[in-house]
Amino acid sequence: MNNSEQVSESATLRLQRIFGFSTFRANQEEIVQAILAGRDIFAVMPTGGGKSLCYQLPASMMKGTCLVVSPLISLMKDQVDAANAFGMQAGLLNSTLSATQQHEVLARLQEGDYDLLYLSPERLATAGFFERLRRAPLSFVAVDEAHCISEWGHDFRPDYLALANLKQELPGVPITAFTATATQRVQEDIVRRLGLRQPLKTRASFDRPNLFYQVQPREQVNSQIEAVVVAHPDEAGIVYRLSRADVEKTAAWLQKRGVKALPYHAGLDKQTRGRNQEAFNRDEVQVVVATVAFGMGIDKSNVRFVIHGDLPKSMEGYYQETGRAGRDGEPALCLLLYSRGDYFRLRPFIDQLPDERERQLGQAQLSRMMALAEQPICRRRAILHYFDEEYGLDNCGACDVCVHGVQSINATIEAQMVMSAIYRSGQRFGAGHIVDIVYGARTARISTLGHDQLKTYGVGRDRGKRFWRQFIDGMLAQGLLKSEGDPYPMLQITAAGEEVLFGRAEFVSHQMLEETGTRSDEPSYDEQLFALLKKKRREMAEEAGVPPYVLFSDKSLHQMCNLFPQTPAALLAINGVGQVKCERYGRPFLEIIAMYAAENPEACARQTAKIQDTTPPPARKQTSGPTMDETLRLAETGMDVEAIAVERQLQPSTIASHIGELLQQGKGLDVDHYVDPAVRDEMTELFRVHGLSRLKPIVEGMEGRAGYQQAHIVRGFLLSQGWKMEAEENAGHQD
Ligand code: ADP
Ligand code: ZN
């Protein structure tokens, strides 16, 4: 290569002109320069890190064709479409083409017509193919998803083994390999099998700063999933479930509630799977509910949320699956619904592994995953730590632990309460029943077993059931309890637990704090305009027969809805808009923006003012605003106050006041669902004495057996029964 200064400059210019990006991302420039210098490359980059640009950009600058080996035929057309949309010359060669078409492609390859030619790996194994390739002008080979060559990887494909001959068959053609696999063993395997010669090895950080990680206790899984879907109207998401049956159930649940959702699992025939995936890819359905069989073929950049309805088996799996969210770099949510019981559902998968070592590994992986879900440690830090990467910041600002904060409290007494309930009931019951004892629930099982006679019955009534559930998880995580028995796990006290039970040691519990104050849930772009542009994008994509994100990414559209570009020059300044895209697709978007800006001058001014405000935009979008309707909708699914509070990221007291208000309005909620009838009776007596206008005397009168939350609810109920507030001037809420 000649003067590298010059090359560097022209690569940067090309980055702007063709791809519309102003700067390289981490590692991209180094890789591009090394490819231009003719080196072999081994690059590890997380999903969404921008791998394709690394080979597309030099391919556009070098003589000859870059062969791109890509594992999925279904994806190839989209990749080719995407490259062509940037104005590159890209083609594909796979079994979907007729013999004549294949001939044509090969003839064009010979002529050096392509910048990029996408191939399936089995193509390389066909007789005489290397012979042909040797006669064609080639710049280099790019092996995408290179981990498919490793039997140690999760996506091993025998077809990929043909790539082991590349070096010998095409001597002198540099090989570049790209993967998002994080495991060391697989990485070494790839380099060895491909026979890379002194490759440039790079590894980008696995941090995905635009992903928000959150873990919620699983209660009513489908309602919890639905709530997220509803909070992201018109935004694409993937829901992972462990079993095919659950995939079907969740998909049906969402469909019944009017969500456009489709299932995907290996039990469906190939055609149906292909159809469902395509519908998702093209924004025709909002949600795919799937087993882990789904994902490799997904290049969709605008997935805004990934929900795990069950615990994944390993951190690798979790990272890959959540990694499918937010490839475009825009905020996206990764929610894990966790229940400790998942352990017992996953254990059989591990137990059936033939090899003892593999079983141990499986067990260790599962434990790491449980630790992620249970420990109040920054989720991002925990994930990166697993991949041997130390996260530099104390607070990542984009996981539930960091956003809510963690409080460590001496909870020895609470732990003793729980253990006493376990002990007195004979160490024969699971967490659910123990919670019922401590909380003092009135279930048939409690009365049949006479557990309402236990000394510990109801001692923890002032905390919600949910609190106790999580508290027990914390005790399990810290080894005070163990949960044993199959299929019905029973809680038992460990030696460490006994130390605490008998007062010889203390128990410090780490609890996630509830969020204080509400965050702004306003997106940083004009949503109305976004909807218009998105509609246009879909129409145009349909016409062109490509997925919508190929035209402009969500990120590009968001920026348009921020900056209101109204000339081609202004449009070129938008991230992801290069010359060709601007010329080919820009006009209709500019027209819509101009019209919208004329009709809504105040929206335009508002956005401009916002941009001039130097504070950076919020890192992510929150779920919808504090409306009563939303609370009602969640309440109707049977969620309790705490669950709704977590879901809505509001204070439980706020939700309780909503419930009170809704009861008063006669919205058909059942007061008994929220407040124990005995508590309600006691409170009713107190309200009779003190009146309805002030809650404080009621709560004080309850002497810790109930709090403001219950008071709000009971008051709402009494108002619905025709009780009246007396002194209006004192009627303000007390808490
Ligand atoms: P990967 O294949 O690594 O998952 P992609 O190549 O699909 O990732 O890139 C992910 C997204 O990042 C795409 O929307 C792409 O346009 C965008 N992107 C890539 N490089 C840059 C860059 N330098 N600046 C801004 N966006 C980029
Ligand atoms: Zn964090």
Image (cartoon, rainbow, N blue to C red):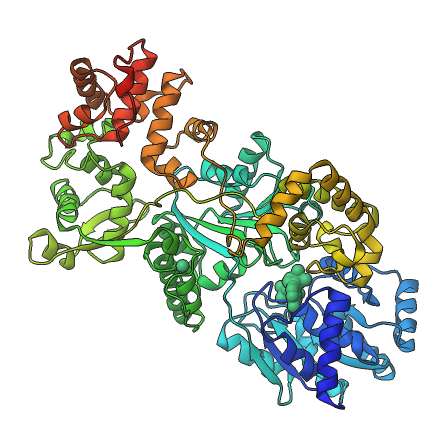
Q: Write down which quadrant ligand 1 falls in.
A: bottom right
Is there any visible trace of residue 640 in the rendered image? no
Of residue 203 and residue 313, the one placed in the foreground of this image is 203
Report the side of 681 relative to 184 (left or right).
left
Of residue 319 and residue 717, the one placed in the foreground of this image is 717
**Rendered view: 13 above or below 405:** below
What is the x, y in percent for residue 9? 72, 80
**Rendered view: 731 above or below 194:** above
Position of the N terminus by quadrant: bottom right
Of residue 447 and residue 568, the one placed in the foreground of this image is 568
What is the x, y in percent for residue 250? 52, 39
Q: Residue at x 39, y 21 (%)?
A: 662
**Rendered view: 579 above or below 43:** above
How many numbered marks have been drawn onto this rendered protein structure?
0
**Rendered view: 12 above or below 434:** below
What is the x, y in percent for residue 367? 35, 61
Residue 454 falls in image quadrant: top left
Residue 96 falls in image quadrant: bottom right
Report the side of 89 relative to 530 (left or right).
right
Is there any visible trace of residue 183 in the rendered image? yes
Which residue sits furthest top? 722
Q: Residue at x 57, y 48 (%)?
A: 524
What is the x, y in percent for residue 481? 21, 53
Report the side of 634 relative to 537 (left or right).
left
Report the side of 69 relative to 243 (left or right).
right
Q: Residue at x 81, y 46 (%)?
A: 588
Position of the C terminus by quadrant: top left
